[in-house]
Image (cartoon, grey):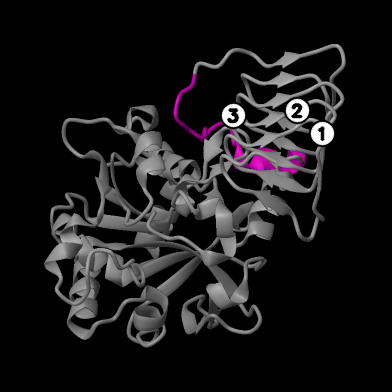
């Protein structure tokens, strides 16, 4: 596919995620044992043959830069086009606010990279949040967009599961066209939008110019809702597995849903592989004292204790007699001998000392900050 350009919004952080995004953008949050959150939507684009992708960033993006690099691991290291990382250098030209201020919404971010948008070579553009866990058939969405004659096609689900106040919903008429847009309602209604949109480059430029001239910052509240009658907006209903990470609880629950083989089968569809930064870790060592139950364990680990219903990232060490149950343990962390962890999210490079007991709850997991020693 050479007629679709990708724009990923990786500038977002969320105060609901607390310590998990203290040192990183949400898009680079580790997920599923060996991935970063951005890998899923980025892989969806690459699997559909998209060769040009711009990633809009703003703050705390060093880990994202380290992960994406030149785009080689995603087959996007190209002489012409390929992966373009878009930090807020262009934002300095806008005198309304300083470069230290975060983007206030999708249209605000697009205005910040307007000169980049003008150089897009393709006729169509897909806009997507970089923190959606999905394995999307992007070609099918583009085909539906073209055949329907829609101005904007929005990927949506008929089974809402996100936090309503941070979500957008469509009510549709008998033709399937969006008739009403609900932004941040008290309760879900209609189709929940997954913040993935396809439109023409021409329309994108017009909407960005319109927004910049009127100080409109939000796509959903500033464009879709007031112009739902003028624009032909058609949802593309996607009812396979799709998760939007919005809270600590959501991050914990979504990770642990990967323990369900049916969920894994939908996320890791063999015909559309999920790419990530290549690593050369040794195989995980399981000592004779180790016991593993219903868990995902990445390469490079040393397991001497018990792991149950947990996600274990690469290079984690779990000592003899330690018990890790219902946890998410990120890379290069050490759980020393006889420690006991239950319902814990341990960020990178955490050390839980020998004999320590940490307990959260399934509906309130406890987060151990990156680099902590407890």
**What residue range appears in magenta?**
260-279
> Mark 3 sits on what residue?
332
Mark 1 or 3: in front is: 1
Q: Image check: 123 left or right of 74?
A: left
Residue 3 seen in the current view: no
Residue 78 is situated, as x and y percent measured from the top left of the image, at 22, 31
Between the residue at mark 1 and the residue at mark 3, the CA separation in whole angstroms equals 17 Å
Where, by quadrant of the figure, is residue 294 drawn? top right
Where, by quadrant of the figure, is residue 269 drawn? top right
Q: How many marks?
A: 3
Residue 55 seen in the current view: yes
Between the residue at mark 1 and the residue at mark 2, the CA separation in whole angstroms equals 6 Å
User: Of 310 and 260, which appears nearest the observer?
Assistant: 310
Q: Image check: 146 left or right of 95?
A: right
Residue 260 is situated, as x and y percent measured from the top left of the image, at 77, 42
Where, by quadrant of the figure, is residue 290 drawn? top right
Q: Main secondary structure of the magenta part?
A: loop
Q: Residues within 10 Å of mark 3 (few under 14, many from 20)?
A: some
> Mark 1 sits on what residue?
339
Residue at 18% of width from left, 74% of height from top? Answer: 209
Residue 215 is situated, as x and y percent measured from the top left of the image, at 24, 82
182 to 54, vertically: above or below: below
> Mark 2 sits on what residue?
336
Q: Image check: 65 left or right of 28?
A: left
61 to 35, vertically: above or below: below
């Amino acid at each position: 596919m050479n007629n679709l350009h990708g724009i990923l919004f990786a500038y977002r952080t969320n105060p609901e995620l607390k310590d998990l995004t203290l040192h990183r953008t949400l898009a680079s949050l580790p997920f599923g044992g060996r991935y970063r959150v951005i890998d899923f939507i980025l892989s969806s684009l690459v699997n559909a043959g998209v060769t040009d992708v711009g990633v809009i960033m703003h703050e705390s993006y060093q880990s994202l830069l380290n992960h994406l690099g030149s785009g080689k691991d995603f087959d996007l290291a190209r002489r012409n086009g390929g992966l373009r990382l878009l930090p807020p250098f262009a934002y300095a030209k806008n005198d309304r606010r300083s470069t230290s201020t975060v983007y206030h919404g999708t249209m605000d971010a697009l205005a910040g990279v307007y000169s980049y948008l003008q150089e897009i070579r393709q006729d169509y553009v897909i806009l997507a949040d970089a923190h959606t866990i999905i394995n999307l058939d992007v070609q099918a969405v583009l085909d539906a967009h073209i055949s329907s004659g829609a101005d904007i096609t929005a990927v949506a689900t008929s089974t809402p599961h996100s936090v309503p106040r941070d979500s957008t919903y469509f009510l549709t008429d008998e033709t399937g066209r969006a008739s009403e847009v609900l932004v941040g309602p008290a309760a879900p209604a209609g189709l929940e939008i997954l913040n993935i949109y396809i439109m023409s480059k021409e329309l994108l430029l017009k909407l960005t110019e319109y927004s910049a001239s009127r100080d409109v910052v939000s796509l959903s509240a500033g464009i879709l809702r007031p112009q739902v009658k003028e624009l032909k907006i058609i949802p593309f209903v996607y009812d396979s597995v799709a998760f939007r990470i919005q809270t600590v609880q959501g991050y914990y629950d979504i990770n642990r849903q990967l323990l369900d083989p049916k969920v894994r089968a939908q996320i890791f569809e063999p015909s559309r592989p999920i790419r990530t930064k290549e690593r050369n870790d040794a195989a995980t060592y399981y000592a004779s004292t180790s016991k593993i139950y219903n868990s995902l364990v990445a390469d490079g680990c040393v397991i001497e204790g018990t792991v149950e219903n947990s996600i274990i990232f690469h290079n984690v060490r779990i000592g003899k007699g330690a018990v890790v149950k219902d946890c998410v343990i990120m890379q290069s962390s050490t759980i020393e001998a006889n420690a006991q962890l239950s319902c814990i999210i341990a960020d990178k490079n955490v050390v839980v000392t020998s004999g320590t007991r940490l307990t959260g709850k399934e509906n309130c997991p406890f987060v151990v900050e990156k680099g902590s020693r407890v």
